[in-house]
Image (tube, rainbow, N blue to C red):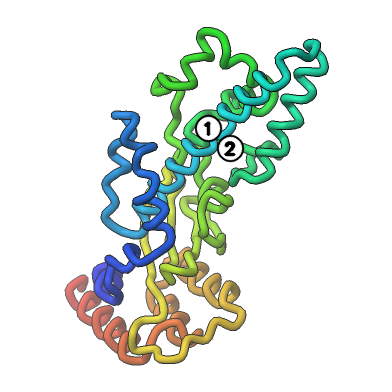
Amino acid sequence: MLATIFKNVKDRNHYKNSAEYEFFKSNTSYLESYPYLKKYLTVKDDFSLIRSNIIIRSLINKKIIEATYDFAKATYASKDEKERKELIDEKLKQMKDTLPYILKNETKIYIPIFDFATNVIYEDNIEKIDNYPYSLLRDEFKESMVNPFEYYNSCLFSSSLTSLIYLNSDTTSDAFYHPFFETIYFINHQGELDYFIPIFDDKIFEKNTDNLKERLTKVANSYFEVNRDKMINTLYDEGLISLSLYEQLVKDIKKRSKKEK
C-alpha cells in the first residue's frame, strides 16, 4: 500500500508540537481515573491522539454538566419544585452553549461515550442521576459506555469535539482533513483508520491553501474510486505534493505493478 511511503513523508511525531497534544497532556487525569479508559493514554500518532482527545472531551463535558447541575440544585434549593426545575434547566442550557458536541438525529450529544438514550437523560432528565441506578452514571459508568467511534462514527469525527474537516464519504468510510496535521484521514464506520495521506511534504516551499477543501475532496474521491494512479496524479496536479514525491510514488507504483504480475 502507498501508506508505507506516506508514513515516511513527514515526521510522524509532529503531533507532539500541536495544541491537541498539549490538551491531551494537560488532561490525562481524566483517563487515569478509570482503568477501562487507560488504553487511551497510549498515543502513538496523530490519529490516536484525535481519538483520545474525543474521549477526554466527553469526560470533561460530563463533569461540567454534573457539577453545574449540583451547583444549581444547591443554589435554588429554597425555590418551589416547578421554579427550581426551570432555573436549573436554564442554568444548564447556558452552560451547554459553551460545550463541544455532536449532532445526531437533530439532538445535541455532549457525552458520546454514552448512547443516545443516556444522553437524553443528561439533556432532559438530569435529576435522574440523583437516584439509583442512574446515580451510577456519575462514577461507575463502565457498563453504560458504548464505543463512541463505532456508535456515532462519522458525525463524531465531524463534530466540534475534533478539529477535523469533513470531505466526502463512500459506503464504507469517510474522508476528513486535519489542518494542523495536514493529513487526509479515511476513517471506516468502526471508527478505525483505513488510510491516511499527508500533504505539503517538505519539498513544497510555498503552500497554496486556496480552495483547499475542494482540492482535497478531489483526492478523496479518487481514493473512493479505488483509482491509485488518479489519486497520485490529483495530489500532484492540485499542488498538494511536490514533484520529487510524485516521482517517488509513481516509481513505487511501477515496482508494485511488476510484482503483482
Relative to 235, is 71 above or below?
Answer: above
Q: Residue at x 32, y 63 (%)?
A: 16
Relative to 14, is 62 above or below?
Answer: above
Query: Where is residue 167 drawn, in percent x and y?
Result: 56, 64
Q: Callout 2, which amino acid?
A: Tyr
Q: Callout 1, which amino acid?
A: Lys
Query: Where is residue 103 drawn, in percent x and y?
Result: 64, 43
Q: Which residue is mark 1?
A: 62
Q: Quadrant of residue 204?
A: bottom left
* Alpha carbon separation for disc pair 1 and 2: 7 Å
Observer-nearest residue: 127 or 180? 127
Q: Are marks 1 and 2 in contact (CB under 8 Å)?
A: yes
Q: Is residue 31 left or right of residue 72?
A: left
Report the number of numbered marks: 2
Q: Residues within 10 Å of mark 2 (few under 14, many from 20)?
A: many
In what quadrant of the picture does the C terminus appear? Answer: bottom left
Q: Which residue is mark 2?
A: 110
Q: Residue at x 58, y 37 (%)?
A: 110
Observer-nearest residue: 142 or 104? 142
Label 2: element kind: loop
Kindly tell me whether residue 140 is visible in this rendering: yes
Looking at marks 1 and 2 on the same chain, the residue that comes earlier in the sequence is marked by: 1
Label 1: element kind: helix
Relative to 26, is 151 above or below?
Answer: above
In what quadrant of the picture does the N terminus appear? Answer: bottom left
Observer-nearest residue: 140 or 246? 140
Kindly tell me whether residue 1 is visible in this rendering: no
Q: Residue at x 61, y 44 (%)?
A: 99
Query: Where is residue 36 drawn, in percent x and y?
Result: 31, 29
Observer-nearest residue: 234 or 261? 234
Disc assigned to residue 208 = none
